[in-house]
Amino acid sequence: MGDNFSSKFERVCAILNKYNQRSDKLIPILQEVQEEYSYLPEDTMTYIATALGISPGAVFGVATFYSHFTLEPKGKYIIKVCDGTACHVKKSEDIIGVIEKELGLSSKKKTSDDMMFTLETVACLGACGLAPVVVVNDAVHGAMTKEKTAELIKQIKEEELANATV
Amino acid sequence: MLLSDKINLEERKQHYLDQTKNYRSKIVICAGTGCMANGSMKVYAKFKEVIRDRGLDVTVALKKEKADYMLVESGCQGFCQMGPLVTILPEDTLYTKVQVEDVEAIVDQMLTANGKVEHLLFERPDTGERIAKQDKIPFYEKQHRTMLKLCGNIDVNDLDEYIANEGYFMARKAVLEMTDVEICKEILDSGLRGRGGGGFPTGRKWDLTRVNESDVKYVICNGDEGDPGAFMDRCVMEGNPHSVLEGMIIAAMGVNATEGYIYVRTEYPLAVSRLKSAIKVARESGILGKNIFGSGKDFDIHVMEGAGAFVCGEETALISSIEGKRGMPTLKPPFPAQKGLFGKPTLINNVETLATVPVVLRMGAEKYSQIGTATAKGTKTFALTGNVANTGLIEVPFGSTLRQIVGEVGGGVMNNDGTLCGCDFKAVQIGGPSGGCLTQDHLDLPLDYDNLQKVGAMVGSGGLVVMNQGTCMVKLARYFMQFTQNESCGKCVVCREGTRQMLALLDDIIEGNATQETLDLLEELAQTVKVGSLCGLGKTAPNPVLSTMRYFKDEYHAHVFDKRCPTGECEALASYRVIPEKCKFCSLCAKKCPVDAISGSKGVPYVIDTEKCIKCGVCITVCRFGAIIKG
């Protein structure tokens, strides 16, 4: 635990040093920290505040203002369903419904219990020509249907299962 | 110093032309977000492999003196729905939906001179005719591509190719030969107006920043394209990043700035990486950094990634965000031109505006101002999406009509099942959550800033979403209201609470709990939010509601007074019924109905008891004759 703890802060320190502890670089700092841990742990935010010489409230304020930041850990697969106008007109709601049903999620419960999947809706991914769009981690899947979505989730689950048994 | 202080553009251009003149063909493969999602990079790799297998030589980014073919990874070509797109130059053949398996056939056809792989050519959905040449496809033929001309045509990673297409010549002219006053005047004379939504004259904005004396000034490029359904800026940043940099250099010379920022939304990772690498090569060539073009002047650009807040598209909020704070708008004045980033005079323009600047200088103000209408000069890009045959990125002159855009470029309206409907659209939503909708009555309205304002819409950043007859306008208004309610930063009470209440009122309408009072209250609240908000987000948030109420009053009334949704989209108001003529008395629906709401017998068409019906939709799914409808 002790080792874990110090190595955790070492990585944060490296990021802080990269930006010369400048408080105007708070957003890129938080972005890199989140990339490191997949979310923003509370103690890390307090630490960043002290290092930058600003109040923890200021850091917390920024972290909660921008939708890219998350204060809770996310699943291994982050499924983003685009609900921009073009995708919405092409029935992205149906796709969200399928995913929620397949993974037992709801608008309140975003991450599955096994920490495998997190479902997010985003305003627009700018790939409107392919609407409706689903992005799993960084792979873009265009022109989705309810059937294709169910198939995609099944495929990921099978891959995971295969990896687990190996 | 190893790098030449003064880049010789003529030499670089000639060198590029000499190198490429002996190639048999140039194969351009679209590497925009859309085509990449459809596997265009695999197609790219396969081309390289197949050409080499045939014993021929192919060159990629690093060009050689002699090669048979040149393979180019381009930015977005605009016709996203048909991707992956492959263009063969110089004959200008466009292949659509190219898969790895098709590559061999294409290469073989290229070797045997003029043949074409017929089944990959674009097929006109209405006539079935195959079209080979890119500029003969209606989608491209009816456009007027100036700013987008190179986007999708040149290699995004190749500085020399940009230079060979006259790139950076105008930046050099601005740096070495023009004074700040001359630059501002040229832009003002061209009539260029901001492409990000506001439509403020660009030249005047530059001049206002120029006159403020300061040791440090900034130029910011606003790439926080947040409007859902709009992706013009993404395509430019991905497809021709150097044009954005060149526009920023010219702007910097016009206002005497030494530092620039490009603020890109985090949802566009490809744009971020392409801009960063373009900045790197521009620095290495002495185009950015210290002593640019050997002039003794300095100008450098940084990329800042947004963190997901729509309101940061507003200029003062964007500035707060770069400063590391919550992206909340501040009161104007002071305008950014007086006191902007870190308290210094700051010029802030949208991506499309800045990428248009080199085009304006190249054409000259006078010639540029001949395109467009009296009050809106030049061309505008639109992201054409929704229920339309050809979706993608288009560029047309200001003053084009919806008839031209949707009918000709877009190729007509589509049904929900993906077939061409041959009918009229119900509405076109323009300008995203800040804009409004246009109807059939506006088919021949010349689109520009002022005309759209008059009919209660706005150009906005340029999202054009086409909707067919099956779209419920109340639900659409609710969709946009939810978006703005989510994105309201919370600073102004009327925006924060007003949008929330408006959303609740719209929910009442959709769920069948509304009365005349709901409609009155909704309208009153809309006006309040409009007047009482500080920034553009709040001021324009009620637009979709007001504009749908104006043009689709009947549909609101149907929801409120008849408790009926004409399109059947609103679940709570939908009712299921059997079309008697289609019913074949098979009784399947009655058997499957979980609440026994359906009754009938042999020879008598079945009927649904709406009192008992729980709207589960099972009957529609099981009916084999399409005899049950919702609406």
Image: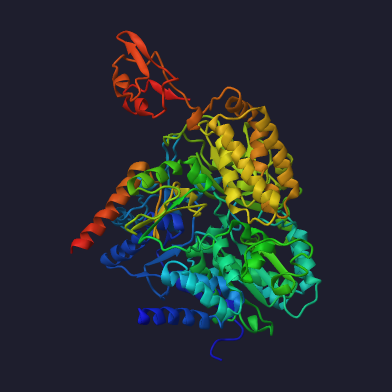
The answer to whether residue B52 is left or right of residue A70 is left
Q: Quadrant of residue B111?
A: bottom left
Total marks shown come to 0
Q: In this view of the protein, can residue B573 be seen by the observer? A: yes
| Residue occupying the far bottom of the picture | B1
Identify which residue is drawn at 31% across, 26% down. B622
Identify which residue is drawn at 42% across, 28% down. B615
Q: In this view of the protein, can residue B401 be seen by the observer? A: no
| Residue B613: x %, y % from top left | 41, 23
Q: Quadrant of the N terminus of chain B?
A: bottom right
Q: Please, which colouring scheme is shown?
A: rainbow
| Residue B237: x %, y % from top left | 55, 63
| Residue A42: x %, y % from top left | 49, 69
| Residue B7: x %, y % from top left | 59, 81
The answer to whether residue B238 is left or right of residue B66 is right
| Residue occupying the far top of the picture | B603
A141 above or below B318?
A: above
| Residue occupying the far left of the picture | A166
Identify which residue is drawn at 33% across, 46% down. A102
Question: Which of the pair A34/B98 is nearer the observer?
Answer: A34
The answer to whether residue A3 is left or right of residue B424 is left
Q: Quadrant of residue B297?
A: bottom right
Question: Which of the pair A86/A18 is nearer the observer?
Answer: A18
Q: Quadrant of residue B621?
A: top left
Question: Which of the pair A69/B453 is nearer the observer?
Answer: A69
Question: Which of the pair B246/B327 is nearer the observer?
Answer: B327
